[in-house]
Image: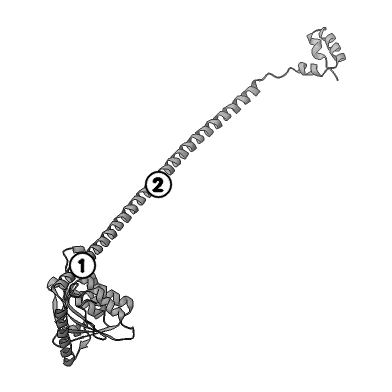
């Protein structure tokens, strides 16, 4: 068990610097060890620390449905207020202070994400609007100190607890400090510090690695979307061009066909005119030739005889069938 998180029956304590003196991993293990029906009291005396550790505790409590009451003695500031915000009920000593501020980070993107989470948690806790919360946090890294009454009026804390409860808590904190001082040797302290630094560094590395992957994946997704859109545009433009060319070819063919039809119509008309003229200029078949074809052999002989009589007599001859 982490020596900086001391349990006494159903009591847990959040003291010192969060992320250094206080570690989320061990605290979550302690919370998870209690039976669900047992009421847990979490006593807070901390000026804050790592937002990551505080968010880890907050999300773990909500995930597991763990219920506890928080008691603020002396000061609950910065990240410590996030842990207290996960409680079912929060109480504060009459002489205690409540301290809030924006996220602190040299990385602007990370700072914006921290501010967003802090605002969301405070809004769920207090019911205050974002503009009103923004006014409280506008002091930036300097933060805003609130008295116990102000913290209660604004909804960060439920109510005050009695003086005798505060005195009992202070006595217990002294016991906790004595236990820590008596049990921690320089070697153990250096080992603990080294382990904490390693865990913090690994946690930060993991966080930024995850963010880099998210950014990388987002960039890749946008790149793929851009390429797909570009290819689709090319296909659409190609088909539109082909349709346009096809329409132009069809129009040209239609004009060509109409011209051919017109030419053929004129040609046919001309041919009809030639046939009429030819029919008009054809010499009629001589009547005698027609009749000659119609004469019998005997008649032909008679006709020959008549022909020998002369043209005048021939015209007076009428053949009969």
Q: Is residue 85 visible?
A: yes
Q: Distance between the residues labelled 1 and 2?
A: 52 Å
Task: Report helix, strand or loop for mark 2.
Answer: helix
Residue pictured at 16% horizontal, 85% vertical: 175
Depth check: give the residue in front, 85 or 52.
Answer: 52
In the rendered view, would you say 136 is above or below 301? below
Displayed quadrant of residue 54:
bottom left
In the rendered view, would you say 38 is above or below 313? below
Task: Report helix, strand or loop for mark 1.
Answer: helix
Can you name the residue that lies furthest to the right here?
Answer: 298
Q: Position of residue 301 (x, y in %)?
A: 86, 11
Residue pictured at 60% horizontal, 24% vertical: 274
Left or right of residue 234: residue 257: right
Residue where numbered disc 2 is placed:
235
Q: How has the structure been colored for display?
A: one colour
Q: Do the residues under discs 1 and 2 have CB atoms within 8 angstroms?
A: no
Left or right of residue 240: residue 308: right
Depth check: give the residue in front, 209 or 133.
Answer: 209
Q: Where is residue 170 in the image (x, y as percent from the top left)?
A: 15, 87
The image quadrant where one finds the C terminus is: top right
Left or right of residue 247: residue 194: left
Chain-order first, disc 1 or disc 2: 1
* Front label number (1 vs 2): 1
Q: Where is residue 161 in the image (x, y as percent from the top left)?
A: 19, 89
Using a 10 Å C-alpha cutoff, classify the residue at mark 1 as few (fewer than 14 neighbours), some (14 to 19) or many (20 or more). Answer: some
Can you name the residue that lies furthest to the left here?
Answer: 142
Q: Where is residue 82 in the image (x, y as percent from the top left)?
A: 22, 76
Residue where numbered disc 1 is placed:
200
Residue pictured at 17% horizontal, 70% vertical: 191
């Amino acid at each position: 068990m982490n020596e900086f998180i001391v349990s006494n029956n159903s009591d847990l304590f959040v003291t010192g610097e969060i992320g250094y003196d206080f570690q989320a991993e061990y605290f979550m293990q302690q919370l998870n060890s209690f039976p669900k029906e047992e009421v847990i009291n979490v006593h807070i005396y901390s000026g804050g620390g790592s937002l990551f550790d505080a968010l880890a505790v907050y999300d773990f409590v909500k995930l597991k449905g763990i219920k506890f009451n928080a008691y603020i003695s002396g000061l609950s500031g910065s990240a410590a207020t996030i842990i207290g915000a996960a409680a079912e009920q929060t109480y504060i000593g009459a002489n205690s202070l409540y301290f809030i501020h924006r996220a602190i980070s040299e990385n602007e993107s990370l700072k914006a994400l921290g501010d967003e989470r802090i605002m969301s948690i405070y809004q769920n806790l207090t019911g205050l609007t974002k503009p009103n919360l923004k006014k409280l946090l506008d002091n930036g890294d300097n933060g805003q100190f609130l008295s116990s009454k102000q913290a209660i009026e604004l909804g960060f804390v439920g109510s005050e607890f009695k003086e005798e409860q505060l005195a009992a808590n202070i006595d217990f904190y002294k016991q906790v400090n004595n236990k820590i001082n008596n049990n921690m040797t320089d070697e153990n302290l250096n080992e603990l510090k080294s382990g904490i630094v390693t865990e913090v560094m690994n946690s930060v590395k993991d966080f930024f690695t995850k963010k880099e992957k998210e950014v990388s994946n987002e960039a890749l997704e946008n790149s793929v979307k851009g390429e797909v859109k570009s290819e689709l545009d090319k296909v659409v433009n190609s088909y539109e061009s082909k349709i346009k060319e096809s329409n132009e070819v069809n129009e040209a063919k239609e004009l060509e066909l109409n011209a051919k039809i017109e030419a053929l119509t004129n040609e046919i008309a001309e041919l009809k005119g030639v046939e009429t003229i030819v029919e008009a200029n054809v010499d009629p078949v001589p009547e005698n030739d027609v009749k000659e074809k119609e004469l019998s052999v005997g008649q032909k002989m008679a006709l020959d005889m008549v022909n020998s009589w002369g043209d005048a007599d021939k015209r007076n001859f009428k053949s009969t069938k």
